[in-house]
Amino acid sequence: MPFPEMRMRRLRRTPLLRRLVRETMLHPSDFIYPVFVSDVISSPEPIPSMPGISNYPLAMVVEEAARAFEAGIPAILLFGTPGQKDASGSDSVSDEGIIQRAIGEIKARLPDLTVITDVCLCEYTDHGHCGIIKQGYVDNDLTIAQLARQAASHAEAGADMVAPSDMMDGRVEAIRSHLDNEGFELTPIMAYSAKYCSAFYGPFREAVDSAPQFGDRSTYQMDPPNAREALREIEEDVDEGADIVMVKPALAYLDIIRDARDRFELPLAAYNVSGEYAMVKQMAKAGLAEERRLALEILTSIKRAGADLIITYHALDAAAWLREG
Ligand code: PBG
């Protein structure tokens, strides 16, 4: 039935009518909130490029985790800055590592909060790469053995889920079999499956001081123009035993999220990364748009594209905005 019998504007007439036919609704339980803990500070340190986000010392990280829990956010994703960085990222596999202690603190106070840990070496290595270097090249197989130890160490400390973000080949399988051997067969893996070599990670690298000291991450992270390759990466992780797969970043890769949703049955996460957050903050600061509307529009687009879970620095604010209605 064409115009004038059909009028699309009929269902847009009032707020409640619009709500009635809304296809995509965000909920605080869609969100995972990234939390930064650092061994080199003694009071919270705001991250300049990410207003509202801070690095927390061990003694205070539980307070930030509690804010997420009280906002109805089911999970946090924990990132650490160690006291000492070295060539193999040894803090990341130590019982006394920053993340291991942070997990202990958080689970003791908030046993019901889901604590997911980033499994990678870049925050722990002095060269800033996501793996172990051999002859100037990030060595895949040495790295995945270290990542498997790191994941088991996190599980031992009480992590509810591990999230490898390194983009080495075979790491999901290496982590899965090591977790199972160590008795952690119920610890799920959320794999950063299609992680692109993106300029949108800039603010994060400032936050954890993890910019590579030489070269870049293009020999392991994906080349942004490639879409079919993302599906191969995801398929590989599914075959290796991933429980949740992820596309990262989100906003410039909504097509990949849609492709992944159409192709795979697993829960799908998308990472609304630091640069996406910083852009919203800068636009709002410049008075070009309202932060709340920008952030909710972006988060809705990520869910509409097919993501089930959204990792976002806006989680606390978005949960509050959604409660206001
Ligand atoms: C570690 C890691 C990165 C992010 C999450 N885990 C940075 C990178 O690959 O350089 C980025 C998160 C963000 O930008 O919000 N490998």
Image: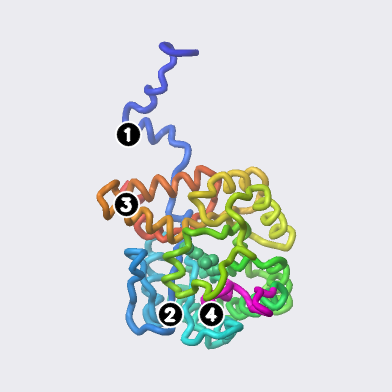
- In the picture provided, is 160 more to the left or to the right than 60? right
Using the numbered discs, state the Cα–Cα distance from disc 3 to disc 2 in whole angstroms: 29 Å
Using the numbered discs, state the Cα–Cα distance from disc 1 to disc 4 in whole angstroms: 50 Å
Q: Residues within 10 Å of mark 1 (few under 14, many from 20)?
A: few
Give the mark nearer the N terminus: 4 vs 3: 4
Amino acid type, residue under disc 4 in the picture? Tyr
Q: Residues in magenta?
A: 119-139
Secondary element under disc 2, as helix, strand or loop, is: strand
Q: Which residue is rendered at x = 41% and y = 61% of the image?
A: 313
Q: Nearer the viewer, mark 2 or mark 1?
A: 2
- Report which residue position mark 2 lands on: 38
- Report which residue position mark 3 lands on: 283
- Report which residue position mark 4 lands on: 124
Asked whether disc 3 touches disc 2, contact meaning CB atoms under 8 Å apart, the reply is no
Q: Which residue is rendered at x = 48% and y = 76% of the image?
A: 80
Using the numbered discs, state the Cα–Cα distance from disc 4 to disc 3 in whole angstroms: 33 Å
The answer to whether one can see residue 245 in this image is no
Numbered tag placed on residue 15 in the rendering: 1
Secondary element under disc 1, as helix, strand or loop, is: helix
